[in-house]
């Protein structure tokens, strides 16, 4: 399938809810958008929490040797996700609370890269990181460990897909332009979820092929 040109954000450039729509209909839309904004704020706070609480741990003098220089492996491009959501996406959502059908586009490709890196992060945390970062978790008095926080970007993309599906369900076929925007947005989110899985599968196959070549060289030695 060809990749849609670009994904979505709520943006000041598009459409408002026509006054002829029923109060009940507008109320349902508002509820969906309110949930989107509320959960987006929570998501941004979680990303900020990871950066503020756990990034400095990578500078500690007692950092295990196997974790040194591995910040990008553990956290992937999480800092770029935070910059995008805190500086742009959340603000756009908040500015459109009164106009839930305003839709435009933006680049979400960074999520595919985050998904591709996630297994490497999980492996490094399982082998060395969880024990090291546990002390910080206890110090923070947090019930959730770092590995759980690092799942949030993956979970967030799935949440976007569900919220967009709900918005599409509430639109009538008469709202052709709004439906077109929302369906394109939904397709982009789904594409990024699939693309992340595809990148992961390609990476696994590549590493498997490298292993086979190394094995063959041993056999012929």
Image (cartoon, grey):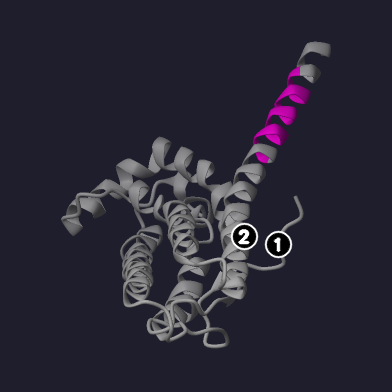
Q: Secondary structure at mark 1?
A: loop
Q: Position of residue 188 (x, y in %)?
A: 62, 60
Q: Quadrant of residue 59?
A: bottom left
Q: In the image, is residue 16 part of the stretch drawn in magenta?
A: no
Q: Secondary structure at mark 2?
A: helix
Q: Does the residue at mark 2 contact the one at mark 1 (Cβ under 8 Å)?
A: yes
Residue visible at 48% across and 46% down in the picture: 121
| Residue range highlighted in magenta | 203-215
> Compared to 150, does 21 lie above or below?
below
**Mark drawn on residue 39:** none
Q: Position of residue 41 (x, y in %)?
A: 34, 71
Give neighbour class at mark 2: few <14, some 14-19, many 20+ (Cα, 10 Å): many
User: Looking at the figure, which quarter contains the C terminus?
Assistant: top right
Mark 1 — residue? 4
Front-most of residues 100 and 38: 100
> Residue reaching furthest left?
141
Residue visible at 36% across and 47% down in the picture: 147
Q: Quadrant of residue 33?
A: bottom left
Q: Position of residue 104 (x, y in %)?
A: 59, 77
Q: Position of residue 31 (x, y in %)?
A: 32, 69
Residue visible at 34% across and 68% down in the picture: 28
Front-most of residues 172 and 55: 172
Label 2 and label 1: CA atoms lie apart by: 6 Å
Give the dominant element type of the magenta stretch: helix, strand or loop.
Answer: helix
Q: In the image, is residue 210 part of the stretch drawn in magenta?
A: yes
Mark 2 — residue? 188
Front-most of residues 135 and 109: 109
Front-most of residues 110 and 207: 110
> Compared to 72, does 83 lie above or below?
below
Give neighbour class at mark 1: few <14, some 14-19, many 20+ (Cα, 10 Å): few
């Amino acid at each position: 399938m060809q990749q849609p040109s670009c994904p979505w954000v709520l943006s000041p450039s598009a459409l408002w809810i026509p006054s002829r729509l029923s109060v009940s209909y507008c109320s349902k839309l508002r509820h969906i958008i309110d949930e989107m904004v509320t959960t987006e704020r929570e998501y941004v706070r979680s990303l900020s929490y990871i950066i503020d609480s756990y990034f400095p741990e990578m500078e500690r003098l007692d950092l295990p040797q196997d974790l040194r220089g591995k910040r990008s492996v553990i956290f992937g491009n999480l800092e770029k996700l935070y910059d995008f959501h805190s500086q742009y996406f959340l603000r756009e959502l908040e500015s459109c609370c009164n106009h839930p059908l305003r839709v435009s586009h933006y680049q979400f490709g960074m999520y595919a890269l985050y998904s591709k890196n996630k297994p490497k992060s999980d492996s490094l945390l399982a082998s060395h990181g969880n024990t090291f970062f546990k002390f910080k978790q206890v110090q923070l008095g947090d019930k959730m460990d770092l590995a759980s926080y690092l799942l949030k970007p993956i979970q967030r993309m799935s949440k976007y897909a569900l919220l967009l599906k709900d918005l599409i369900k509430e639109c009538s076929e008469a709202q052709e332009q709004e439906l077109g925007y929302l369906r394109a947005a939904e397709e982009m989110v789904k594409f990024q979820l699939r693309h992340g899985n595809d990148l992961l599968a390609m990476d696994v196959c590549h590493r498997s092929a490298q292993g086979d070549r190394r094995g063959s060289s041993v056999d012929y030695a």
